[in-house]
Image: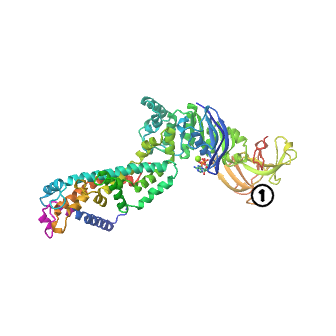
């Protein structure tokens, strides 16, 4: 906007601030609740001023979970979530960048067929194939393991598709120049394609980290032992029954803890993330 | 250093025949330009020499070695692409050093060779920059630098100057010439710009639809075009080709006898034969009406300062035979008839059937 129109400025700011408040308010309430005692939380209406239980509540959940619901330590769950949220994007990016490299740069029989097969799986999200996948994992004895938790989520048509689109924008002459320079296919991949894909990889990493971190249905199915819980599952397991039976201050503390890592990742990778979505180094 | 031999090379993409039998022997150190209209197969031929395209039939040899089955890196060539194809994430230095690094040369040698190439091309101050921080001309130079450091037996250029503006193109053209004089490396150069071809080439190959219409020194191609295609392609505006026939006594009667020229020497063998009479626009001169060989009706003028281009037609029909003339005068009537003459030495004769030149 180049024009200067005070009224428009005012309205747009009002809308933006209003929107931000609507998003931020529940987060604020969750944080406040996590600093109070159970009695304070249960008061109607709940006080919107911080209580004095911050250290105590967070120490409690980190080391021993809740007292009525799941007693697994949230610190362990955070580790599990972190493993899952890291293995999934790293695995996804590794596999899909290699497969799209093969699809774009090599001529082999049924190349297009394979591409379309990958593409078709886009239509099958985890939830649709969850029962057969569970069956396979259980037959392989992978229930309650990190492999079981992450493997089925690693295959990714979206990422393969994204890399393919990106590779197709790299001029053919670059591959030819590398061929004349004597670089074999893998050398070209390592020296040219990979560095050029950095921003795309970063953007994908952020998206997939959050995707992995927020997984709910799959970990719920595949983990039955407390030491394999992810933090999202942990929250669910702390909720045991009716409103009165739950220790909301502890659940809110866990929720806040569960929100932190994705927020940190987004903040740290923001620059790369935006770059990866809007520009490429060509 | 080595020459290049192209022997009856064909190339098909599926059913489409793109190169239809081209042969040429290129001497060691020669600068050969391949020129022709868009889509005639210049790039394809060059890419076959580079090893980027397979050869459907025929043989290409670099030096003594037939290279048909060799990978590009084993052919001892270096190529410069039209869009430069620099590695965007590498500095100028890294771009130039990349090939040598892959060959596993020692660091000191790479450093020395890159420095030398950078000095030749005046890139020494830009070595740390990324390609995107360079101007078009500088990128072009880096692309040439990348070719030079490899010290190949043959340079291959595919329209290297066509992305540059007119002024820079002229400058880079003379730099290329100087570079070749210094390195004396056999060079194959593709362009569709006839001025580039004329100025750079030791010999040029004029291509049309996958065939070599003529191979020869630039002046020879200009003075004795082998076919009407070459006659029209080299020279600007293109040569005028007027249908006529050879009459008794070595006279050519063209445009239904309106134009009558006596050939420098009688050609009894050709008498009665249909021909195309070729006259270059620059070989016309104005004259008095009584001396005129033809008087085209002026359609429009282009004043270039030093020269004027006159476009007109012969006869009453506006859609009739078109002629173009390049004259060294700038004061001209904008319409009406323009009496022109030309000297018989500048006449070219072509066979209208085969379009080949009738040898004199
Ligand atoms: N991979 C391909 N598959 C099919 N046809 C092709 C392929 N590459 C080139 N051609 C065809 O071969 C012909 C010659 O192409 P080429 O690129 O050699 O032309 P060119 O003389 O370099 O033209 P320009 O001056 O426009 O670069 C064109 O008609 C083109 O359509
Ligand atoms: Mg071309």
Crowdedness of circle 1 by 10 Å Cα count: few (<14), some, many (20+)? some
- Is residue A114 shown to the viewer in this render? yes
Q: Which of A152 and A192 lies nearest the eye of the viewer?
A: A152
Residue A133 x/y as whole percent: 36, 58
Q: Is residue A206 left or right of residue A114?
A: left
- Is residue B286 shown to the viewer in this render? no
Disc 1 residue: CB within 8 Å of ligand 1: no
| Range covered by the magenta-colored residues | A28-50
Q: Which of A184 and A111 lies nearest the eye of the viewer?
A: A111
User: Which residue position is annotated with label 1?
Assistant: B315
Quarter where residue A21 is shown: bottom left
Secondary element at tag 1: loop
Q: Which of A156 and B62 lies nearest the eye of the viewer?
A: A156
B72 part of magenta stretch: no
Q: Is residue A70 above or below residue A180?
A: below
Quarter where residue A56 is shown: bottom left
The chain letter under disc 1 is B
Q: Is residue A45 above or below residue B285?
A: below
């Amino acid at each position: 906007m180049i024009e200067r129109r005070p009224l428009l400025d005012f309205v747009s700011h009002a809308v933006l601030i209003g929107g931000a408040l609507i998003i931020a308010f529940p987060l604020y309430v969750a944080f406040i609740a996590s600093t109070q005692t159970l009695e304070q939380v249960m008061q109607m209406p709940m006080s919107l001023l911080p209580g004095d239980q911050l250290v105590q509540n967070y120490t409690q959940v980190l080391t021993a979970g809740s007292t009525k619901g799941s007693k697994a330590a949230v610190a362990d769950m955070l580790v599990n979530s972190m493993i899952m949220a890291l293995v999934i994007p790293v695995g996804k990016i590794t596999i899909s960048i290699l497969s799209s490299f093969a699809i774009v740069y090599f001529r082999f029989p049924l190349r297009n067929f394979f591409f379309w097969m990958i593409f078709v799986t886009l239509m099958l999200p985890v939830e649709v194939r969850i029962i057969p996948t569970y069956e396979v994992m259980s037959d392989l004895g992978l229930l309650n393991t990190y492999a079981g938790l992450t493997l089925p989520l690693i295959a990714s048509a979206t990422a393969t598709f994204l890399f393919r689109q990106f590779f197709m924008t790299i001029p053919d002459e670059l591959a030819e120049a590398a061929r004349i320079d004597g670089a074999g296919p893998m050398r070209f991949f390592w020296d040219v394609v990979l560095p050029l894909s950095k921003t795309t990889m970063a953007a994908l990493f952020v998206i997939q980290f959050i995707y992995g971190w927020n997984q709910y249905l799959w970990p719920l199915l595949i983990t039955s032992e407390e030491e394999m819980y992810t933090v999202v599952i942990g929250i669910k397991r702390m909720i045991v029954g009716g409103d009165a039976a739950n220790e909301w201050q502890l659940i809110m503390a866990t929720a806040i803890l569960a929100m932190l890592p994705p927020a940190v990742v987004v903040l740290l990778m923001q620059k790369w993330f935006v770059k990866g979505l809007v520009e490429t180094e060509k | 250093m080595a020459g290049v031999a192209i022997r009856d090379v064909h190339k098909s993409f599926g059913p489409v025949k793109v190169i239809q039998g081209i042969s040429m022997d290129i001497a060691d150190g020669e600068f050969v330009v391949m020129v022709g209209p868009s889509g005639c197969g210049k790039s394809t031929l060059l890419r076959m020499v580079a090893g980027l395209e397979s050869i459907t039939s025929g043989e290409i040899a670099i030096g003594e070695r037939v290279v048909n089955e060799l990978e590009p890196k084993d052919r001892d060539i270096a190529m410069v692409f039209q869009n430069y194809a620099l590695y965007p994430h590498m500095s100028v230095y890294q771009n130039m050093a990349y090939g040598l690094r892959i060959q596993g040369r020692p660091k000191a040698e790479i450093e020395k060779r890159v420095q030398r190439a950078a000095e030749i091309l005046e890139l020494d101050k830009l070595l740390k920059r990324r390609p995107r921080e360079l101007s078009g001309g500088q990128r072009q130079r880096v692309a040439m630098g990348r070719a030079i450091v490899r010290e190949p037996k043959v340079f291959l250029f595919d329209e290297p100057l066509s992305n540059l503006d007119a002024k820079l193109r002229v400058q880079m053209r003379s730099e290329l010439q100087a570079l070749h004089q210094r390195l004396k490396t056999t060079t194959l150069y593709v362009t569709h710009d006839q001025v580039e071809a004329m100025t750079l080439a030791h010999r040029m190959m004029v291509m049309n639809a996958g065939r070599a219409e003529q191979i020869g020194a630039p002046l020879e191609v200009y003075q004795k075009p082998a076919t009407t295609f070459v006659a029209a392609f080299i020279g600007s505006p293109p040569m005028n080709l007027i249908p006529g026939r050879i009459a008794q006594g070595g006279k050519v009667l063209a445009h239904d006898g309106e134009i009558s020229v006596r050939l420098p020497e009688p050609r009894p063998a050709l008498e009665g034969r249909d021909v195309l009479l070729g006259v270059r626009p620059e070989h016309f001169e104005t004259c008095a009406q009584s001396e005129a060989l033809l008087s085209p009706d002026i359609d429009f003028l282009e004043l270039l300062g030093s020269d004027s281009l006159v476009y007109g037609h012969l006869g009453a029909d506006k859609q009739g035979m078109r002629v173009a003339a390049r004259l060294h005068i700038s004061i001209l009537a904008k319409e009406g008839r323009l009496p022109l003459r030309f000297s018989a030495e500048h006449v070219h004769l072509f066979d209208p059937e085969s379009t080949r030149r009738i040898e004199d």
